[in-house]
Image (spheres, rainbow, N blue to C red):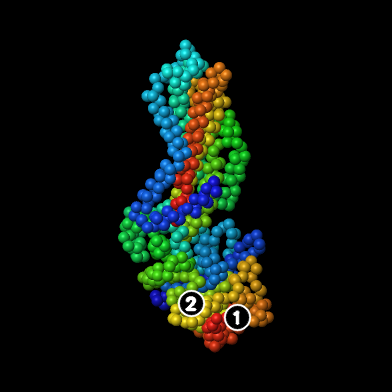
Amino acid sequence: MDNTRADSSGSVAHAPNTMQMMSMGSASRRRRGGRWRTFLRNRAAVVGLVILVVFILAAILAPLLTPYNPSQQDLAMVLQPPSAAHWLGTDGSGRDLLARIMFGGQYTLIIGLLAVTLAVLVGVPLGLISGYLGGWCDMIIQRVTDIMLSFNTFLLALALVAVLGVGPTSVIIAVGIGVIPQFIRLTRGVALSLKQRVYIEAAESFGASRASILWRHLLRNAVSSIIVYATLNIGVAILVAAGLGFLGLGVQPPAAEWGTMLSEGSQYIFSAPYVSAFPGLAVFLVVLGFNLAGDGLRDALDPNLRRG
Amino acid sequence: MTSASNTSEPLLSLKNLSVQFRTGSGVVRAVDDVSYELNPGETLGVVGESGSGKSVTVMSLMRLLPEASRPTVTGEALFGGRDLLTLSNRELRAVRGSGIALVPQDPMTCLDPVFKVGKQIVEALRAHDQKSRYSALRTRAIELLEMVGISQPERRFDQYPHQFSGGMRQRAMIAMAMANKPKLLIADEPTTALDVTIQAQILELLKEMQREMSIGIVLITHDLRLVSEMADKVVVMYAGHVVERGDGRTVFDNPQHPYTLGLMSSLPQASGSDRWLRPIPGNPPSLANTPSGCPFHPRCALANDRAECRTSLPVLRAVAGADHRSACHFTDELTPQKQAELTSARRATA
């Protein structure tokens, strides 16, 4: 993934190792604490985490936090600019934008999470099998991955929605399939590098079956890379899902979804820019949050720091 | 030794084993026509420099050579009367661990860093025992840790490899190797990565295991002295060939191949000798392009650029001593005087 970073942290790896050797008993606890501290020391990562926590809480607690119903139209209050009553203003049907963004966060976050879960569940086993077994199996999986990668993620998801039909479920499936090839490539690389390790050879020499090596050693060793990559890819998934919503292929109105809201607001872009600006800002912030947190996780979980 | 009863059938018997790799720069003959035998309860030392094919030989019979290197293995490797090279994958997995077990070279990398050491031993047990419950396997794993001399085995069971020292990791590897009571243990330079005091302990442990369970050991090393202490039989390999073979003590006391002699004179002497170390000049040959004739002749102190050495490949021939064989055209010239001359020569005129 990020070679320069991996190299530079590899050279630092010796110092904590010797420390761990010296303090045998509490080493594993200290190591876990060390990761958390590494993450917290990274200011950008903390900002990302705070953004995510705010949005997640806002989405979950939306019914408690806002007095407005996100789909309640109030034609007397159409296109109101931000005010004390409507903090972010109202849209073309007089619905409160803040309430819609908070409720819409439920869709956005769930779509992002489920799409990436789908991609992990399908992509990780395929990638590990491909890298570990090699041969014709690797050949077939990788050529299919090549074909999928040759499409832009968004274009692939778009084509899939065209086949599956519109609606939240097909958005999740389409976006999930769109990011699968990334996970196949990632875990294949991990499997290729791990299968050269002596402990894999040792496990083979004790008669361990291929399946048990795959699911125990390879998967466990790949977990931190997968977590980091999944976090980063939730951002991508949200962006693609919002894009589909904007094109009217995602969650259908009147449900509040950020992409759909952007699209509805775009017709007032000159008269009432805030109607589209705030949902756009929400997408921007959440994707930024996932990217910053994912970067921080990568630094904290970097497998190069844990070897030895 | 308990081997007396069934000397008729060796535990392991390699017959004309050859391993070739096809690479971009041509065919590499890593192992060429190697034959040796090991009886139950015996220790066989395989000695040679890096790249002499000693590890490749055993990896090929465990069928653990990386597939990406596209190895071609020919010949026979009989283990308990069955040819390992023709077993199906399923049969092979049954042999691995419970028939033959491997102690790898580098204890620092042979344990998976993300699993507790105990869990990895349980995994080795589980590979050949699907029925027992976890608690039973855990008890056996703790017994194994205790057997290989790890103190506080219950506590150590739940620790990660990074909490083990190098010597303890090697002990844990031996515990894993012994988990399924193999008949043959292959130790690939088991002490190279350890410091000297730990080396002695590990070797003592291996001997103890052997005494208790009468397993056969193939000890791969470049350390001739270690072999002379441990091994009943010795095979000296050079450039994929067996150049000398025989009884451990005999080969060490009366080496009949100039390469063995060279290995010995490059050993430091323990007892206040003022002798300088004599390295063998030159490097081992590239296996993609081995010298014609005897592969050792360019570095040989005995060859003197004689035509025979340059053109014809010597075969293993019987020399004085019980079952002692050497692949040199001019073993006859290796009289005790000549041996002394070649080994104890003081500082070569630099």
How far apart are labels 2 and 1 at the CA level? 19 Å
Residue shown at 49% from the left, 73% from the top: B223
Sequence-first disc among 2 and 1:
2
Is B285 or B135 nearer to us in this picture? B285
Residue matched to label 1: B301
Amino acid bearing label 1: Ala
Does residue A129 appear in the picture of this structure? no
A199 horizontally vs B310: left or right? left
**Secondary structure of residue under mark 2:** loop
Instruction: Tally the marks.
Output: 2
Q: Position of residue B196 (x, y in %)?
A: 42, 70
Of A209 and B259, which appears nearest the observer?
B259
Label 2 and label 1 in one chain:
yes
Relative vertical location of residue A217 with respect to residue A112 in this rendering, above or below: below
Element marked by disc 1? loop
In the rendered image, which quarter is residue A86 located in?
A: top left
For residue B136, side relative to residue B338 (left or right): left
The residue shown at (46%, 59%) is B109
Specify the quadrant of the image occupied by residue B50.
bottom right
Residue sitting nearer the eye, A38 or B41: A38
